[in-house]
Image: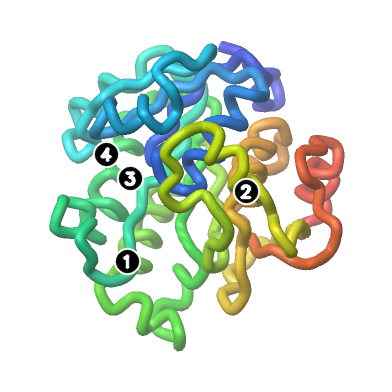
Amino acid sequence: MTADLDGVLSPGAHVLVAGATGGVGQLLTMRLVEAGYRVRVVCRNKAKAEELFGCIQPGMEIWEHDLTNVEEATHCMQDIDAVFCLVGTTAFPTTRWSKGSTAEMSCDVVPHNLIKATPKTVQRFVMVTSAGVERCNQLPFRILDSFNVLTYKRKAEQSLIESGLPYTIFRPDRLIDGPWTSTDINTLFKADTNGSRPGVKLALKDIFGTGEACRAAVAEALLQCLRVSCTTGRAYAITSTRDDGPSKDSKKWEQMFAMVR
C-alpha cells in the first residue's frame, strides 16, 4: 500500500474507479494513470472500456463485473488502496434507464454495494453526488428529484459517512464541457478542457446549484484530494468560475482545500 501516515495516497497506490466510462470518470481515469497511480477500471462492458481507453494502458487494468451484485463488488476490492464511486444516471428517465441504469440502481444500489464491499483497510473512498442533495425539497432541486435521484444520492452519502471508511464527497454543479461520448483517447484528451471557466470554487455546505462545473476541473479535484490529508471526512460543493484555476498544480490545490472552512 502506497499511503503516508497522514492518509495521503502517493503515486503507485492502487485505486478502483467505478463509473470510469462516464464523462468525469474518463478524465479521472486517464489523469490517475498519467499521475502514476495504478488504476482498476470496473465496468459492465469490458469491450466498451477497452475501445474507449485502449486495450493496453500502462498502469491500468479493466475488470468486467456487475456492481449490482455485492459479491462481485467484493471481488473487485482485492489489493485496493482507494475507491472512486462515480456511478450515476440521468435525473429523468432515458434509454439508459431501460438498460438498467435507473435512479435506484445507479444512485442507491451500486454505491451501497461498493461501500459494503470496501474493506476497512482502504485509505480513501471518494464519492461524487450532486449539488442539491441536502435541498431536495427546495426549487429547482425538487423538480430534479422527481424520480428520487437526489434522494438516493443523499442516502448513499449518509451510508458512506456512517460506514467508518475515510471518505471525501464532491457535489458538483451542473456538469459542462466534454467528454460526452468520447470513443478514443485522442478525442478524450482534446475534450480535457475547462473552456471559459478554468477557476474552481469549493464550499463545505451544499450551497451551489445555479452554476456550472467543468468535468475536467471536477476530475482534477478528485485526483488531488488523495494528496491532501485535510480532505478526509469532508463533503465539498464544487463549481467553476471564470478566474484562473489551479489546473494540475498540486500545491495550489492543497492551498485551496486548506482554505475551505
Q: Is residue 34 above or below residue 17?
A: above
Say what amino acid the circle numbered 2 marks: Ala
Per the image, the residue denoted by label 3 is 111
Q: CA distance from mark 4 to mark 3?
A: 5 Å
Per the image, the residue denoted by label 1 is 149
Mark 2 vs 4, N-terminal side: 4
Q: CA distance from mark 2 to mark 3?
A: 22 Å
Mark 2 vs 3, N-terminal side: 3
Closer to us: 216 or 235: 216
Q: Nearer the viewer, mark 1 or mark 4?
A: 1
Per the image, the residue denoted by label 2 is 216
Provide the secondary structure element on which disc 4 rests: helix
Q: Residue at x 49, y 36 (%)?
A: 125
x and y, in percent, of residue 52 in the image: 41, 32
Q: Nearer the viewer, mark 1 or mark 2?
A: 2
Mark 3 vs 1, N-terminal side: 3
For the residues bearing labels 3 and 1, Cβ distance under 8 angstroms? no
Say what amino acid the circle numbered 1 marks: Val
CA neighbours of label 4 inside 10 A, class few (<14), some (14 to 19), many (20+): some
x and y, in percent, of residue 5 in the image: 69, 19
Q: Residue furthest bottom?
A: 139
Provide the secondary structure element on which disc 2 rests: helix
- Residue 113: give its label: 4
* Coloration of the structure image: rainbow
Q: CA distance from mark 3 to mark 1?
A: 13 Å
